[in-house]
């Protein structure tokens, strides 16, 4: 099934998401949409304030650009340390201002409610899983995939630390043997860095990049990511898509 975030169609070609915090403005990101960025991930857990009025006010300034809203728990590498009740309330508040939300597959206290609300308003749901220590076994990855499917998310995102080249091989095999699933797969760390450039050509729907400070180990900065993706894909694969402003 084709997934569309805003007016960015996933799966047609490699898509690049720029991770931004509240110290980044619309004026800062617009030039990168011209160069090859396709959508934004708003890392709300890394905003200077998570008060809903402040967060929604900032999100409104990006209206018209395809946006993912993420409030990542500190249990999976994020900055959110508040209660799950408050996190759920904030997810509900941001729904009108984003086109998709990212919620951890293992956030069992709130993910059903987040998914239900997203479906009610027509937002895409990314169910995510992060392992910052190692790459899970193939059986564990299958378990994450199955759990994500059962939860009803639209896309399953798995990010795992790659400590050796064999870890990258595990993730590659998993990706190419699940080509009918909507997956975002990322290898973190030095050994996983090639995944950020090559996995989008093997079926991973999105690769992530940054301005300023990386949001995960092994990320390439925005200009390098765009340049390298263009070199790999050729001059015609990165033409403007209709949503670019």
Image (tube, rainbow, N blue to C red):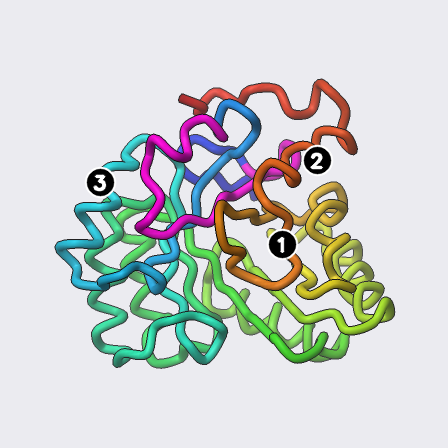
Q: Say which residue appears at 55% left-offset and 20% top-offset.
A: 240
Q: Residue furthest left?
A: 53
Marking on residue 219: 1
Q: Residues within 10 Å of mark 1 (few under 14, many from 20)?
A: many
Which quadrant would residue 225 be assigned to in this image? top right
- Badge nearest the viewer, 2 or 1: 1
Rendered image quadrant of residue 161: bottom right
The quarter in which the C terminus is drawn is: top left
Is 220 in the magenta? Answer: no
| Residue at the (61%, 54%) spot, across then down | 184
State which tag comes first along the sequence, 2 or 3.
3
Q: Is residue 33 shown left or right of residue 205?
A: left
Contact check, label 1 and label 3, Cβ < 8 Å: no
Residue hosting label 2 = 229
Q: Measured along the vertical axis of the image, is residue 236 above or below residue 108?
A: above
Q: Are marks 2 and 1 in contact (CB under 8 Å)?
A: no
Position of residue 45 measured from the top left corner of the image (x, y, whole percent): 34, 64
Q: Which residues are magenta?
A: 10-32
For marks 2 and 1 on the same chain, the one whose residue lies earlier in the sequence: 1
**Nearer-the-camera pick, 175 or 56:** 56
Residue 12 lies in the magenta-colored region = yes
Q: Nearer the viewer, residue 241 or 79?
A: 79
Q: Which residue is at the front of the view, 152 or 107?
A: 107
Question: Under tag 3, what secondary structure?
Answer: helix
241 sits left or right of 178 in the view: left
Q: Position of residue 203 (x, y in %)?
A: 70, 46
Q: Which residue is mark 3?
A: 60
Q: Is residue 104 left or right of residue 238?
A: left
Q: Residues within 10 Å of mark 3 (few under 14, many from 20)?
A: few
């Amino acid at each position: 099934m084709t997934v569309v975030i805003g007016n960015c169609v996933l799966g047609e070609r490699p898509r690049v998401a720029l991770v931004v915090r509240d110290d980044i403005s619309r004026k800062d990101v617009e030039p990168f949409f011209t160069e090859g960025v396709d959508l934004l991930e708003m890392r709300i857990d890394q905003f200077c304030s998570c008060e809903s009025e402040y967060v929604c006010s900032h999100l409104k300034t990006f209206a018209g650009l395809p946006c993912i809203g993420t409030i990542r728990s500190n249990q999976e590498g994020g900055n959110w340390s508040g209660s799950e009740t408050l996190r759920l309330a904030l997810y509900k508040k941001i729904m009108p201002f984003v086109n998709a939300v990212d919620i951890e597959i293992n956030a069992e206290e709130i993910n059903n409610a987040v998914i239900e609300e997203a479906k009610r308003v027509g937002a895409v749901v990314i169910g995510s899983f992060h392992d910052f220590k190692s790459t899970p076994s193939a059986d564990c990855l299958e378990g994450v995939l199955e759990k994500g499917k059962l939860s009803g998310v639209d896309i399953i995102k798995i990010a795992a630390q790659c400590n050796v080249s064999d870890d990258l091989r595990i993730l590659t095999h998993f990706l190419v043997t699940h080509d009918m699933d909507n997956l975002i797969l990322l290898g973190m760390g030095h050994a996983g860095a090639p995944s950020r450039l090559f996995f989008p050509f093997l079926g991973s729907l999105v690769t992530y990049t940054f301005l300023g400070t990386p949001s995960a180990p092994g990320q390439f900065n925005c200009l390098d990511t765009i340049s390298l993706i263009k070199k790999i894909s050729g001059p015609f694969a990165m033409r403007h898509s209709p949503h670019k402003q």
